[in-house]
Amino acid sequence: MFFHIERNSIPLLLNFEYFWQNDVGSCLIMKFSDQEAALLRVLQSDAGLSLSDLAEQAGMATSTAWRKVQEFEKLGLIRGRVALLDPAKADVRLCVFATVRLADHAEASIAGFATVIRAHPEIMEAHAISGTADYILKIRCRDVETYETFMTHTLLRSPFVKSVVSSFSLKELKYTTALPL
């Protein structure tokens, strides 16, 4: 199996076992056959399927499906297999998108803020963004009161945070964890 990899804007064709490390981490751009893409789509929709059901739905032999899954795990393409919980049934109905401005942009402040966000499971996602804010956070809480406590006692008391602007999701129109392949 070969993947198309670009390093320093120079396209290369390399065997999947060979790739390089840089300051950001592993750089690997994969091109999939139709069967591989089908296998990955099936895995993204239900990673709990038996190997035979997975292979059947992807249109390949069971041994091929097993080998492909092993290769994708070895390469880090498949990062894990999880159960997706219903937020309402787990009593974390409130979804908040909070934009955060840092007090300054020194390396120590950025690292300190990263430590804060990693320490709190309420923060489900954190992205550095362009624009007037520095980060956007996706936060799940039971209710507005719980969020207000979290925001005032955690985010706003952090020495790394200058300001927080919160927006509450009124209705979820689409949610997926599946990447478009």
Image (cartoon, grey):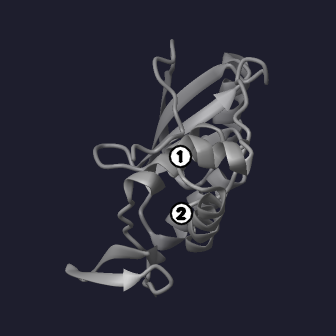
What residue did someone put label 1 on? 58
Local secondary structure at mark 2: loop
Q: Judge depth for marks 1 and 2 and give the one in front.
A: 1
In the image, what residue occupies the spot 64% across and 20% down?
Answer: 94
Q: Quadrant of residue 106?
A: bottom left
Residue 27, position as x, y percentages in the image: 41, 75
Q: Could you tell me the amino acid type at mark 2?
A: Leu
Residue 103 percent location from the top left of the image: 46, 54
Q: Say which of 33 and 60 sits in front.
A: 60
Residue 50 picture quarter: top right
- For the image, the number of numbered tags is 2
From the viewer's perspective, tell me whether residue 175 is left or right of residue 4. right
Q: Position of residue 12 (x, y in %)?
A: 27, 83
Tell me if I can see residue 103 in this picture.
no
* 159 relative to 85, above or below: below
- Mark 1 lies on a secondary structure that is helix
| Residue farthest to the front, as pictured | 61
Question: Seen from this angle, which residue lies furthest right?
Answer: 90
* Residue 40, above or below 164: below
Disc number for residue 77: 2
Q: Earlier in the sequence, mark 1 or mark 2?
A: 1
In the rendered view of the protein, which quadrant contains the N terminus?
bottom left
In the picture, the disc for residue 73 is none
Is 134 rendered above or below residue 87?
Answer: below
- Kind of residue sitting beneath label 1: Ala
